[in-house]
Amino acid sequence: MIKANLIWANESNKVETLEDSDCLLILTTPELLASQLFHFSTPAKTYIEQVFNDENFSGNKGQCVFVQGLKAFKTSYISDNENSGQNKISQQLAEVKRVLFYGVDFALFEASDAPNVSSRASTLSKTNDPSMVNRSSYASNSNSAFNSKSTSDLSQTNAPAFRYLEQQFDALFKKLKSVSVTLEKLSLMALSTAETASSDPVNTIGSHSPFLSALLRSYFKHGYHFMGYKTNNTSVSNSQPLNENNNANSVEKNDANNGAINQAIDIRGTLSLALDAKHFTNAQKRLVSHTIRYETALNAAMTWAKDLAHMPANLCTPDYLAEQALHLAQTFNTVSCDILNESTLKQLGMNGYLAVNAGSQFAATMPILRYTAKGLENSPPVVLIGKGVTFDSGGITLKRSPDMRHMIYDMAGAGCVLGVIQAVATLGLNINIIGIVASADNAIDGKAYRPGDIITMHSGKTVEVMSTDAEGRMLMADAISYAKQFSPSVIIDIATLTGATISALGHKATALFSNAPALESALVEAGELANDRCWPFPLWPEYQDAITSQHADMMNAGINSPGAISAGCFLSRFADGTPWAHLDVAGTAFTYTKSLSATGRPIPLLLSYLSSCAVKNNQ
């Protein structure tokens, strides 16, 4: 996993930023270029200017030039009659192995040319519902200093501007890769004089929470890499358990893991960010620190979720997910965990849940995680339910062979729930959460459930099985029904449920279904703010007709119906009067067309929403 390192720099300690750095990234403009070059020694500056001439580089937006060989000027510093502070900076810059100059347009940072927000989001942003408070508002409300007039402009997140900025930073990091610059040990430092400090791009990024969030989000995204299981790897991705203690029931699985997973190196790269301390107020410094802390926690959560999703199904089993839940509870004293095994699930009447797993050699599990904020022990929780089908063959309704290899990702919803609770616990949000990992393996043998079976669910309702490949809704329906015993404020389930969602929305937005308009609006707004968008679909009574059964209360798949909506209608029957939302992430949690394509979505959306709820609890 890569990380960000913040340094509040002055003229004497900027050298810390460049220690062990492989590359210094300098964001520049035609107007700032001369003042930034002033920090290099005279021989180095002459050399750089010659490279600029050769590459026809003037600092215009999107231009990029890569300078190597500066160490040749290590002993050729500027003359002693120039100030000693400047001399020290020049010496440290001479230690840099490589420098990449990248031209930016300040309109990018001002977002003056960013697209306008959609009319729906504009309407939502005008609501007075406390649950709509955005992520940056959480930062500002967590400390009264952030409410000062001098930083009021910093606590406003412009959702389309954030999206636009992240796109621009994506272009930057793609450019870095195109010139063979790895994102490990990258430094981003403000190079400015007193006259230009306020307009230095790095200072500007640090001064505005959305800009810094967009930079970090993009850096973390492009720096992610799953090394896999090749025997010649010296390190692999961060897919190891949070805790290396394993029980006796998983010896064979962990023997397979030991050669790869347990060799993982937690930190594979670092972005060192140096900001000019004297140009930031204390309130601004706290906001910068909060933003980095938030984005770091979000990245750790997404990295873990992606690593879990990329694991093969012979390693990432229901039992393995249960172990991960237990390790999470061992890591944070605010998190506890109970594991419901197959015998307990049978006693509870979770027959739909167990039917999905009936044909598997692996036992089903249902970990229940509880995150409890201090002072809110008796407050109703937000329940998050993640679909954790560790492999989905389709059962007797067998999937097509070319698509089946992607079904290791059918547990992405469960990985999301684990990641979200880790992020919430890391940040210490003022909210109660119960996370349910609905974990099973949809396989085939003589015990597998069949089309035509009638199953009595945990709620007592009966379901006629039309397709064993509509297994996710069977699993989630029992989990939703079970979750109601916690008297939750809301239930949100996250599932890679239907290919029909991809037909409707592609891989850009998550499909949203809800029986509560306020919850639906809050999730749409949270997605806009986090650049992790979702879009609502209807659950009108007319759509319920498609799952009407002649033999049971309902069918588990519709006939001649829009598949995603039929699935939402099915789940809505088990939520009853509890405020509930279903996020179908089949198109956003991973992409079918690529291997190793897990995205970690919709963790940004959910963390944004939960931060908003925490603000409401603080009021």
Image: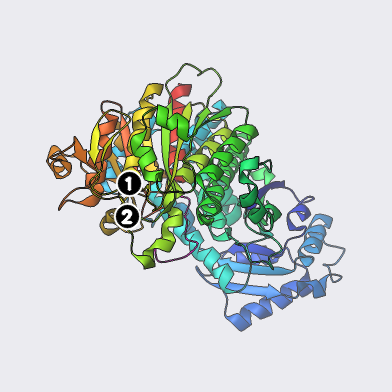
Residue 182 is left or right of residue 379, and the answer is right
Quadrant into which the C terminus falls: top left
Report the residue marked by disc 2: 396
Residue 321 is left or right of residue 452, and the answer is right
> In this picture, is 175 found above or below 149?
below
Neighbourhood count class around disc 2 (C-alpha, 10 Å): few under 14, some 14–19, many 20 upward:
some
Upstream in sequence: badge 2 or badge 1: 2
- Residue 449 percent across, percent down from the top left: 32, 46
Residue 524 visible, this angle: no
* Stretch in magenta: 592-602
Magenta-colored stretch includes residue 204: no
Hey, which residue is sitting farthest bottom in the picture?
Answer: 54
Residue 446 is left or right of residue 35, and the answer is left
Report the residue marked by disc 1: 449
Given the image, on which type of amino acid does mark 1 rest? Tyr
> In this picture, is 425 found above or below 443?
above
Magenta-colored stretch includes residue 594: yes
Q: Quadrant of residue 268?
A: bottom right
Residue ID at (62%, 37%): 327
- Residue 422 percent across, percent down from the top left: 56, 38
> In this picture, is 63 found above or below 556?
below
Main secondary-structure element of the magenta-colored stretch: loop
The answer to whether marks 2 and 1 mark residues whose Cβ atoms lie closer than 8 Å is yes
Image colouring: rainbow
437 or 295, which lies in front?
437
